[in-house]
Image (cartoon, grey):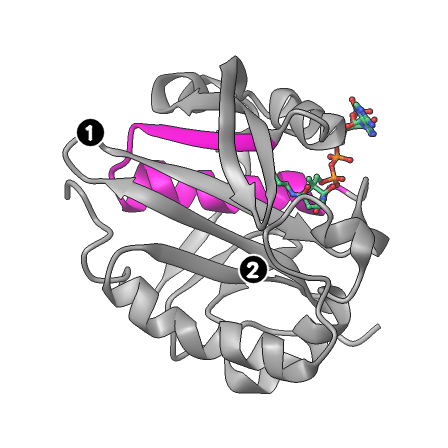
Amino acid sequence: VSVIEPPLDDFMVIGPTLFLRYATPADAPRLFELGSDEAVTRVFSWGPYTQVEQAQAYIESLRAKREAQTLLDFLVVSREDGPIGVTGLTDLAPRDRRATIGTWIGRQWWGSGANRESKALMTALAFRTLGLERLTALANVTNGRSQRALERIGFRQEGVLRRYHRHGEDVHDMAISGLLKSTWEKGELAAVPVEVAGAPPAGWVVQG
Ligand SMILES: CC(C)(COP(=O)(O)OP(=O)(O)OC[C@H]1O[C@@H](n2cnc3c(N)ncnc32)[C@H](O)[C@@H]1OP(=O)(O)O)[C@@H](O)C(=O)NCCC(=O)NCCS
């Protein structure tokens, strides 16, 4: 099995079998392939991708959004299989030390533990490196799999936000869950070995 090593020159979050890095234009074909699956994008406002240019446009938009502190997305890269999905933060509230986390993983890796490890990497980044104290997750009320996946890694459901997300003409109720730093610190996820390399993204560190 070929082993993919993390590149050394960029910001990265590195775990036992996966690492997180910024997507580059060279990732567009693979991201297009992963995001062309209706099972993956069913709950989102975008997709499934029908043209590689859509993945390209997404990748090209990321730097500006990162710099504007509106979106901090990473590619989830498996050392064995290469890129397998995306995870990121939105709705950064520096004063309140919180942000919202979202993830999607290619169908082939559902149930593989990749989601759990990607959350171990993101929570270490959020709570240790960025200084956040709460992560919020929003899942469509029809997305039982996502709600269960969040629960089993320590998120607690807090309620339902009615008519909260609009996708075209469809309006969706969203289940809101939260994970507090104090809960995470005592749980299994915090025990996963995680290394952070490079300079954290400017504007995303809320307390240092
Ligand atoms: C959400 C996602 C990242 C979760 O990763 P995953 O690898 O599928 O999650 P896991 O297998 O670790 O956990 C899923 C859990 O839900 C359970 N489950 C599966 N289908 C379910 C359903 N229809 N209803 C309730 N629970 C369900 C599984 O049994 C598992 O629980 P268990 O480990 O206690 O058995 C992944 O499924 C995905 O990318 N989905 C598409 C995009 C998406 O929905 N993203 C989240 C938006 S909020």
Please name which of the two marks, 2 or 1, marks the residue nearer to the observer: 1
Classify 10 Å Cα crowding around label 1: few (below 14), some (14-19), many (20 and above).
few
Classify 10 Å Cα crowding around label 2: few (below 14), some (14-19), many (20 and above).
many
Q: Is residue 46 above or below residue 25?
A: above
Q: Is residue 87 above or below residue 51?
A: above
**Residue situated in front as seen by the camera: 206 or 101:** 101
Instruction: Measure how far apart labels 2 and 1 are at the Cα level.
Output: 28 Å
Residue 171, image x, y percentages = 58, 36
Check the picture and name the quadrant holding the N terminus: bottom right
Q: Is residue 118 left or right of residue 184?
A: right
Residue 160 visible to the viewer? yes
Tag 2 residue:
19
Tag 1 residue:
96
Q: Is residue 105 left or right of residue 132?
A: right
Q: Is residue 92 above or below residue 138?
A: below
Q: Quadrant of ligand 1?
A: top right
In the rendered structure, which segment of residues is drawn in magenta? 113-139
